[in-house]
Image (cartoon, rainbow, N blue to C red):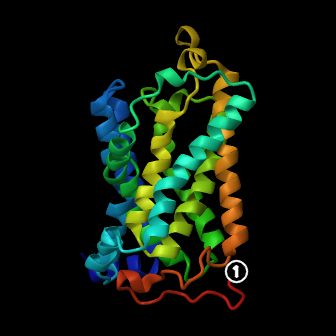
């Protein structure tokens, strides 16, 4: 790569990361939309491949800026974080599921416990989600963008900035009529946006306290997986193949309230500055020199 290009990337790390990330994913999503590939395992796998945009973007920028690809990637294999944090990564999604489902039922949502899949499916779905169904994104969002931004902004502001970038990155899924996202009404899309921001706070909280992208990826995958076990009566949600707007809204908002509430609790307990009780990762975890220092007030 031309030295001047590498120097530009080094000076504009976040912008370069987002440009490469979006270009990779949106190109693949655009090709999928043009192919008119219907809902299938093939479409799901290819959408998952598009989800590698964040790690690709991060890898290119770390390399171009003279960082350490080994140190960056090593964050995904950092598993010695203590039993407490592993319990949090594995069990919090189940708590969100239980509380969200309970709220849904209390508000009058019909349930069908007999239709729930075998519990062991959760482990498979979560394992798949960690490496292909969303967790792999964390090498970019948390493993790169968070430590770079945290040199300038607080943990909370960093999380919200990452959340906005993360939400925008999903845009092609809403434009392809063969994906689940494209079938959502505006109300559900807005709820999804709120959960993206709350999730960004929670994943950053996990990453800042452990330094482990693996933990954030497992946490992310767990949240993506719990929808399989929501006890809502599927026949009632989609009577005659046509989604019931109110019941679908109720199922989504109940879980979203719990997730947003949990993010608020994290900010109140751990503080918006770090979202952690320890020093948080910065660009040194990428083998990079520090960029612009944060302002004195941390804002």
- Residue at 62% across, 63% down: 160
Q: Is residue 18 visible?
A: no
Q: Would residue 165 appear left or right of 2 to someone viewing this image?
A: right
Give the left or right position of residue 19, taking residue 256 as reference. Answer: left
Q: Horizontally, is 248 left or right of 178 in the view?
A: right
Locate residue 273: give its quadrant: bottom right
Quadrant that contains the C terminus: bottom right
**Residue 199 lies in quadrant:** bottom right
- Seen from the viewer's position, the closer of residues 104 and 178 is 104
Q: Position of residue 223 (x, y in %)?
A: 50, 48
Residue 206: x %, y % from top left: 51, 67
Residue where numbered disc 1 is placed: 299
Q: Where in the figure is residue 93, as x and y percent of width and height? A: 53, 50
| 278 displayed left or right of 285 | right
Image quarter of the N terminus = bottom left
Q: Residue at x 67, y 30 (%)?
A: 249
Report how many numbered discs are placed on residues in the image: 1
């Amino acid at each position: 790569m031309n030295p001047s290009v590498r120097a530009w990337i080094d000076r504009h790390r976040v912008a370069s990361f987002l440009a490469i990330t979006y270009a990779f994913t949106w190109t693949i999503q655009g090709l999928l939309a043009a192919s008119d590939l219907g809902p299938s395992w093939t479409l799901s796998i290819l959408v998952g491949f598009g989800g590698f945009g964040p790690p690709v973007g991060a890898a290119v920028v770390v390399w171009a800026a003279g960082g350490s690809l080994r140190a960056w990637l090593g964050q995904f294999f950092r598993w010695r974080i203590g039993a407490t944090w592993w319990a949090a990564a594995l069990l919090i999604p189940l708590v969100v599921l239980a509380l969200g489902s309970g709220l849904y039922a209390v508000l009058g949502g019909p349930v069908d416990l007999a239709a729930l899949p075998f519990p062991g499916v959760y482990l498979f779905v979560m394992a798949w989600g960690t490496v292909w169904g969303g967790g792999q994104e964390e090498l970019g969002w948390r493993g790169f963008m968070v430590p770079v931004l945290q040199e300038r902004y607080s943990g909370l502001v960093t999380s919200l900035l990452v959340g906005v970038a993360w939400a925008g990155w999903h845009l092609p899924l809403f434009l392809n009529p063969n994906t689940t996202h494209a079938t959502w009404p505006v109300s559900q899309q807005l709820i999804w946006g709120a959960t993206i921001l709350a999730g960004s706070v929670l994943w950053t909280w996990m990453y800042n306290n452990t330094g482990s992208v693996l933990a954030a990826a497992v946490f992310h995958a767990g949240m993506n997986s719990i929808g399989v076990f929501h006890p809502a009566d599927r026949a009632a949600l989609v009577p005659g193949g046509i989604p019931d707007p109110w019941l679908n809204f109720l199922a989504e908002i109940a879980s979203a309230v719990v997730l947003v509430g949990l993010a608020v609790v994290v900010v109140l307990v751990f503080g918006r500055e770090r979202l952690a009780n320890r020093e948080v990762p910065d660009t040194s975890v990428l083998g990079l020199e520090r960029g612009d220092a944060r302002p004195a007030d941390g804002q």
